[in-house]
Image (tube, rainbow, N blue to C red):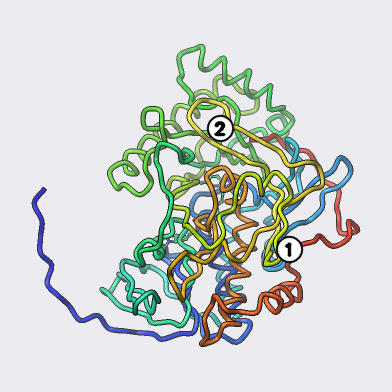
Amino acid sequence: MSTITEAARQTPVRKHVDVLVVGGGSAGLAAATSAARLGADVLLVEKNGYLGGTLAMVTLGSICGLYTVTEADVIPVVKGFAGELIERMNGLGAVKGPMRWLETASLLYDPTAIKLVADDMVTEAGVQVVLHSLAVGVVKDGARITGVIFEGRDGRWGCTATTVIDCTGDANIASLAGAGFEHDPSVIQAPTTMFRFGGVDTERATAMTRDELRNHLEKAVAAGLPLPRTAGGMFSLREGAMHLNITRVLRGNRSPDPLDTEEVTSAEIDGRRQLKMYLEAFRRFVPGYENAFIADIGSEIGVRESRRIRGDYWLTLDDVLNEARFTDSIACSAWPVEEHGAGRATKWVFLKPGTFYELPFRMMLPVGIDGLLVAGRCSSASHDAHASMRIAAVCMALGEAAGVAAAQAGKGDIRKIDIGALRRQLEKQGAIVGPLPGSSSSTKAEQVTPA
Ligand SMILES: Cc1cc2nc3c(=O)[nH]c(=O)nc-3n(C[C@H](O)[C@H](O)[C@H](O)COP(=O)(O)OP(=O)(O)OC[C@H]3O[C@@H](n4cnc5c(N)ncnc54)[C@H](O)[C@@H]3O)c2cc1C
């Protein structure tokens, strides 16, 4: 391969802040807002023209990870920033639930409203926001990250910071800083192109069970439409509209590599090709969809998994399934292990009813790098544990803890913060750091068709 030698350049440093948050998804929104509310000078930088990350750009239909469930109750395990975001969404009529499905429950939401709520929450908190800027480099002093370089609409610029929080989902900053990570395309979960049908008879469609949907779509497969999945998530928040989590894009027998430009390009095109096939399959074979049309497609393919950093603590499957407890716990989760691998079925392993596991602060600290926290789906976890902790509410809880920690660290070392003070502040904000408050906060839920 031939190469081009680029000329050396002087990059302007446009900002110096206490806390620099890169990536404005679930984790980044929570991190930036929480840090700014505690008085830190915070800059949030995002490559898209809007905030919300996967929740907005991939158009999911539900926020998962908020609850643990028993036969009788749906009990919150994540509140704090997530609870406030949901309250604001509720004010716009943009959430519904909790809805029970399989052996869990989630909250349906409108992915367009999240963009509006996200803008309000960060700006009201006093966060400085820069959109349309992609992080492309880091500046280090020994083991310490001291700044990040961005490529914006008007060229390159830099920001220096006391603490950087990597909320890019792909651990882009940690990777640029030389942190260790795991990323193996032969193991990672497959991506999904998400979309929304309009023109659906939602009364009939929402009455359908998972098995009924599978039977209808298996008929489509028998008729020659090679659908990669015949059961999937169907979420309806508005009359006539149905969110579908049902495509599965593979490259041979493995996931395309979301960090490889050529592979992710062909995955985007393949995902949209699948949509045309699903449109035909639903119209012809699934009752209630006779007049369906594609109303909306995620602005990029939904990547479930890429880099997971090697942190001071590595969350394991045993932690997830056996109610792990940590002295530095900063969040809780009860989401099942939900794995979208090759093949038409999705693997689910549920936690025992009413149980949850804790997530330690150390899983956000990349081994050997100072001044950096990594929050969200790229925090330190094994592939199996990630299949549970990667969901939106848990990413918000991790981000909230990262933001509070960075504000509390001030000019000091993020590894030396007072964990007791961090946990107390999170609880003051309504976050659940474990153990769970009494079950009096539980709520009843409706039933919805599962993924
Ligand atoms: C298909 C699919 C379906 C899912 N379904 C559900 C569901 O129903 N419910 C649920 O709760 N969860 C679901 N998830 C999981 C969940 O949505 C994500 O794991 C979670 O939202 C990740 O949050 P995050 O903040 O870690 O990352 P993201 O939300 O991905 O945010 C990362 C942000 O960083 C930005 N960014 C990335 N790189 C850079 C850079 N170099 N410079 C600047 N900005 C950058 C991105 O644009 C993005 O805004 C699903 C995921 C997928 C892919």
Between 323 and 375, the residue placed more toward the observer is 323
Q: Amino acid at mark 2?
A: Ala
- The quadrant of the image that shows the C terminus is top right
Residue 286 showing in the rendered view: yes
Neighbor class of circle 1 (other Cα within 10 Å; few <14, some 14-19, many 20+) is many
Residue, disc 2: 292
User: Is ligand 1 less than 8 Å from the beta carbon at label 1?
Assistant: no
Residue 134 showing in the rendered view: no
Neighbor class of circle 2 (other Cα within 10 Å; few <14, some 14-19, many 20+) is many
Q: Quadrant of residue 331?
A: bottom right
Q: Is residue 360 above or below residue 307?
A: below
Residue, disc 1: 79
Q: Is residue 126 above or below residue 234?
A: below
Between 115 and 74, the residue placed more toward the observer is 74
Q: Amino acid at mark 1?
A: Lys
Q: Which is in the foreground here, disc 2 or disc 1?
A: 1
Residue 34 in picture, x, y percent from top left: 62, 75
